[in-house]
Amino acid sequence: MNTGGAAPGAPLLVEKFLIHGNDFEHGGDVAAQVKALLKQLGVSPDTVRRLSIANFEAEMNVIMYALDGEFVLQVFADAIRVTLTDRGPGIPNIELAMQEGWSTATPEMRARGFGAGLGLPNIKRNSDEFEINSTVGSGTTLRYGIYLR
Ligand SMILES: Nc1ncnc2c1ncn2[C@@H]1O[C@H](COP(=O)(O)OP(=O)(O)O)[C@@H](O)[C@H]1O
Ligand SMILES: [Mg+2]
């Protein structure tokens, strides 16, 4: 498919959002903005739901564990993809971090209802593509996407 002269395979829409570490006050704002945008674009309710679950978990992980992050939404003709790059401590053991129930959340975070250790597994479960890369002492890059019919 060629869309208005854009390069084949190029995103139809790109939106960037900044997320600040420890900013619980605005926790979920990016996921909410993206949800509204996807609805506006006419994305199916099931896709919006799955992506919103993933987006919220990814956003909260930056707020809880990183200094800051850049959330990039790319809408393609056949998929929606998110790349979230953060500056932070990184994840020493990704296999462990991907396990359900494993969390380094502080007692304060748990008191806010976070720290069930289900965020990363839920992002993976709700995505068709999933990739996580992390460098200890530098940061984490999370990529996930959902295919459109
Ligand atoms: N962006 C990140 N930077 C550093 N560590 C992270 C990041 N995201 C997740 N982690 C680590 O992976 C663990 C598991 O994450 P997750 O599955 O979302 O569960 P939870 O957030 O409830 O702890 C976290 O407790 C944390 O140790
Ligand atoms: Mg989490």
Image: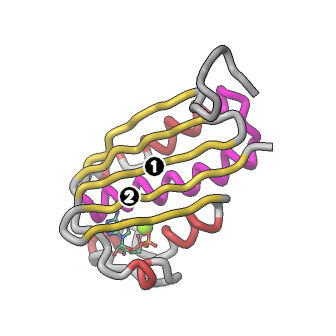
SS class, disc 2: strand
Task: Report ligand 2 position as a quadrant.
Answer: bottom left
Please give left or right for residue 33 compared with residue 38 in the image: left
Q: State how far apart marks 1 and 2 are (Cα).
A: 7 Å
Contact between labelled residues 2 and 1, with CB atoms less than 8 Å apart: yes
Left or right of residue 21, residue 1 in this image = right
Where does the C terminus fall, quadrant-wise? top right
Q: Residue at x 67, y 43 (%)?
A: 79
Q: Secondary structure at mark 1?
A: strand
- The residues colored magenta run 39-66
User: Residue 102 in magenta?
Assistant: no
What residue did someone put label 1 on? 83
Three-letter code for the amino acid on which mark 2 is drawn: Thr
Report crowding for label 2: few under 14, some 14 to 19, many 20 or more residues within 10 A (C-alpha): some
Q: Position of residue 84 (x, y in %)?
A: 41, 51
Image quadrant holding the N terminus, namely top right
Q: Nearer the viewer, residue 62 or 91?
A: 91
Instruction: Name which residue lies at 38% across and 62% down.
Output: 61
Pointer 2 residue: 141
Pick whichever of labels 1 and 2 is earlier in the sequence: 1
Amino acid type, label 1: Thr
